[in-house]
Each structure stands twice: as structure tokens, then as C-alpha cells.
Image (cartoon, rainbow, N blue to C red):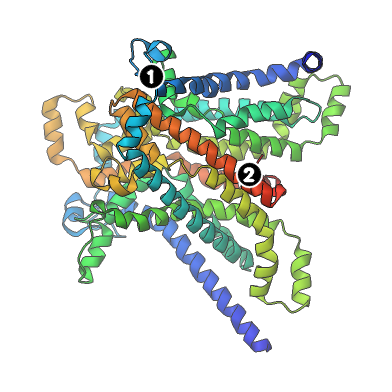
Amino acid sequence: MKPAVKSDELLFSIGSYFIVSVFTILSVIPFLLVLSGSLTDEGAIISNGYGFLPVPFSLDAYSYILSDFSQILRSYGVSIVVTLTGTAAGLYFCTMTAFVLSRQDFRYRNRFSFFFYFTTLFNGGLVSTYILFVQYLKLKNNLLSLILPGLLPVFYILIMRSFIRSMIPASLIEAAKIDGAGEFRIFMGIVLPLVKPALACIGLFYAIGYWNDWYNAMLYITDIKKYSLQYLLTSVINKADFLTKSSMSSATVAEARESLPSESLKLAMTIVSIGPIVFVYPFVQKYFVTGLTIGAVKG
Amino acid sequence: MLKSNTGFIKEFGKNKVLFLMLMPTVLYFIVFAYLPMAGLIVAFKSYNYSQGIFFSPWSGFENFGYFFKSGVAFQVTRNTIVFNLIFIVTSVIASVAIAVFLSEMRNRYFKKVSQSFLIFPYFISWVVVAAFVYNVFNYDYGVFNEILRSLGFEPINIYSKTSYWYVLLPLLHIWKNVGYSSAIYFASIAGINTEYYEAARVDGANTFQRIRHITLPFLKPTVIVLVLLSVGQILRGNMDMFYQLIGNNGMLFNGTDVIDTYVFRSLTGGADLGLTSAATFYQSVMCFAVIYVTNMIVKRADKDYALF
């Protein structure tokens, strides 16, 4: 009996290592392919396809991006400004709201929670939101139209609320009150520093959301100077209007089209637009997993 | 009524600062969530830009009639529901499996490394994923077709037939989300008291028995809550995913156009706003109905799992 059980378990173990390894490899392979493709000579991609090794090696795509760097730089700027302000403002108001909703001595907490939660069940939909933004708030081509739609997801408020509940005992707030601290001071001086891991986790959610957003840009931005990076990439890939809308004269456009490494250019743009997320990721990843843990256990 | 009003005033007097701290968010929700709900009346109007939402003439149910008669309503609803059902089933199976495998592994280093890599696609936008997909699967020089050719098979043009997408989209959905959702399940497994496992081991239970009788039952609540949440969203398409991967490829609309992409295309394509609004109104009402009904069923079955 014993040996049979052992071999079952061994088989299970081998199987699980195998399956997880396959998934893990599949998670990174496409990135390697695109990276190598972006470093491959355009002609070779068209005639042979591309593989894991950039043969023949070429930096044409990147030097092309560098040659018209101003547009990419501007779009980087737009994405960075939107991501930073959106994340900072969103985190601040989200945490402040969650702090109030987490207070057991605040009698209307459940009513307000429902007031927020209801909007996830029923909403006005794209059309009326669009009309509101464009016709009434006049936010077309305004960067606020990229920031406001994602500023306060109800889901983040609720996660933050359970974070605060689990991290800050009511007695701590009581004690601060007895010492004469006002609510706002308690929030700024005690709550914010204590929920740092939660801020990192939800901040990462915010940052990814803002960085990867192309949808609001597509709805509200028509001025190429205000394209976010992901939307610029969308348009490079979909319409190749990168060249036609950029500031070059039409003669240079035609000339550039001739020498344009379009396939490897798309790949290089892809690599460029993944951008800071890849570099930030390893640093915030540990918070991300803790965050998920608390979020999952406490719901 | 009077009593609750004075209660409110009393509470407001007591927690003035807390109310003030809540105000920015309340205002935000009034302007960006509740005002657009009022805007839903556009669905019953023949909207024109100069008269705006409130002064455009009424048209009754004309917009809805057109939306339903054209057959679009049925087609996009069917696609949205079918794809979401596939996504829910496949991703629950895949992420629970990955989480269970990870939790049974002894090699901590392997666990950590694979978890980091698995979550990675979750951080990448669908724009980028669509670029990958195009480059891997395109007919002329995609890696996938290169491999098929070198093995002597006919290359496949996935951008010409919807049936390929019924395989590819769920696979991509798993690929992008499995790291994230398995991390949630993994976290709940980590929360299980280790004494259960020790007791089971003493009783001579093997890996399979431990998984079947301890891990899976403990995961059930998390699975149910997450499935419920996604069932509630079953009429909302993955706009990001569908639009970026399939875009405006008319050949594929039959099988892959979801409500969100239909609405988005009509809105940006300059179609009648009243008609488009009828489609979103329909979506919102259906969503609400679906959530309400699922919640009711769950409540009847087991109160603890209900969402509200």
C-alpha cells in the first residue's frame, strides 16, 4: 500500500511542477519574442518571420523612434502626469473615504457604503457619461478626462476599508481622540502612515490602471499632442497614423514611410510602452501579494 | 421620519469632520455616477447635440424597437454571455489548479519565481497583448504560422474566422489573469490552519485526499464569491480585450461583437446617440436584473454567500 501512495504523490508533484513551469514560461515567452523581434532587421522579419534570437541584429527600429522622439516623449509625459496625479489623488480620497466608512462609531457608514456600491450595480452607461464629459463639463482634449473616470473605483474603497479595519484597532483612534487629536489629524498622522502596505498595493492597482488606459484617451482626446502612450501605441498599430499626424512635412512623411521599419517599429513601440511598469513591478510585488492576501481573507 | 431626521442632524453635529471628509467622494459619485443615470433618458429621446439631454424631443421606445428589430441586440447579448461563461469556467479551473499546485510545492524558490512571472501578464495592457497576438499569429510571418509551415501544415489565418477566437480568447484570458486570480486563491489556501493538514497526514491521507477534503472545501467560499461577482458582470464585455484584439475587423463581428464593443463603435462612429443609449440602457437594466436574480438564488441556497 505505502509504495503505491508514494508513487501517486511523486507523480502529482512532477505533474504540478511541469504544469506550473509551462504556465510560467508562457507568461514570459511573448515578451522575449517581441523584444527579440524589435531588435531584428525589418527585412528578415518580413521574409523569415522572427524567433527568439534577433538575427540579423538591428537597432533600426529604436533609432527610428529616437529620430522622432518628441511625440513619444510627449506621450510618455502625458502618461506619467496622468498616472502620478491620478494615483496620488485617487489614493488620498479613496483612503479618506475608507477611513470614514471603517469607523464603527459613524452611524451612516453602511448607507454611504451602499450609496457608492450601488453605482457598480447600475450605471448611466457610456453614452450619458460621454455626453456629460464632452458637452456639459467640456473636458474634450483635457487631461482631466483621462484622470476623472478612474479616480475612485468602489472596489478599491471597499478593499481599503477592510485594510483599515484590520490594521487599525478602534482603541488606537479612541486613544488619539482622548489626547485631543481631531479626526483629520488622526487620519493624516496615524492612519495614513499605518496603512502604507495597503497604499502600496492599491497604489499599484491605480498606477497600472492609469498607465494601461487607452480607452478614455480614445474617447476624449483628439489632439495628438495629448495622446497617452498606450493610445499612441494603439494608433501606431491600428492606423499607422503616427506619421501622418506627427509634425513632419508631407515630403518627409513620404520619405520616412519608405525607410520605415514598420514591423520592428511596432514591436519596439510595444517594448517602449510597457515602460516603467516592468521596472516598478519587482519593487512593489511583495506589497501586491500581501495586499491580495488581506483582500482575499477579509473580503 | 422626523425622528430619523433629527437623528441625522445629531449624528452630523457629532461627526461633522467625518462628514466633511466624506464629501469629496460623495460629490464625485453624484457628478460622475448618479448624474449619468439621469442621462439614461437619452434612450427615450431622439437626441440632438444643440438641445442636449433634457430638451431633445421624446421618441418613446423607438430607439429600443430599432435596436431589437435589427437583430443586433440578440447577437451581441449572446456573444457577451457565451464568452463570459467560457471565461468564468476556464479561469476558475485554471487558477484554482495553479493555486493548489503552488501550495503543494516544497521548493520555496521555485514557488516565488513562478508566482512573480505568472502575475506579469496582468500588468501589461491589452494594447500590448494585441500587438503580441498579431505578431505571433499573423498570416504572413507570425511565429505560429512559421512553425506550422516548417512542419508542413497549412498556415491559419485567425483574423478571418470567428471559431478560432472561441479558443484563442479564453486562452489569452487565462494567460493574462491566471497569475492574479491564482494569487487570490493561493492567499486563501495560505490562510487554512496547518493543523488540519497535520491531522490528515497522521490519519494517513495522501496528497489527493488532502486536496479533496481540506483544500477544496476551504476554497469554496472564495470561489463562490468570485464567481458570483463575475456572473453579476456577465453582460459587460471585456471591452479592452475584445476591442484591442479584434478591433474593427468586420469579418469577425458575427461571433465576437459584445455589447460594449458595439456601443463603443456606435458612439465613436457617429451613430445615433439615442439608439446607442438604448443599447447601454438595456445593458444596465439586464446587468442589474442578473445580479439581483443571482443574489436571490444564492440567498435562498445559503445566506452567507449572498452579496447584499
Please, what is the three-letter code of the amino acid marked with disc 2?
Answer: Met
Q: Please identify the quarter of the rendering in which residue A97 is found.
A: top right
Compared with B248, A222 (above or below) is above
Residue appearing at x 71%, y 56% in the figure:
B191
Q: Is residue B68 above or below residue B114?
A: above
Residue A160 in sight in this render: yes
- Image quarter in which the N terminus of chain B is found: top right
The percent coordinates of residue B32 (x first, y second) are: 52, 22
Quadrant of image for the C terminus of chain B: top right
Which numbered marker is on residue B45? Answer: 1
Q: Which amino acid does label 1 sit on?
A: Lys
Residue B276 visible somewhere in the drawing: no
Give the alpha-carbon distance from disc 1 to disc 2, as whole Å. 33 Å
Label 1 residue SS: loop
Q: Name the residue under label 2.
A: B296
Residue, x 47% and y 52% (percent of image)? B85
**Where does the image place residue B171, in percent across and percent down from the top left?**
41, 57
Q: Would you identify the image quadrant in which residue B151 lies? A: bottom left
Query: In this picture, is A246 found above or below A294?
Result: above
Whether residue B14 sits left or right of residue A32 in the image: it is right
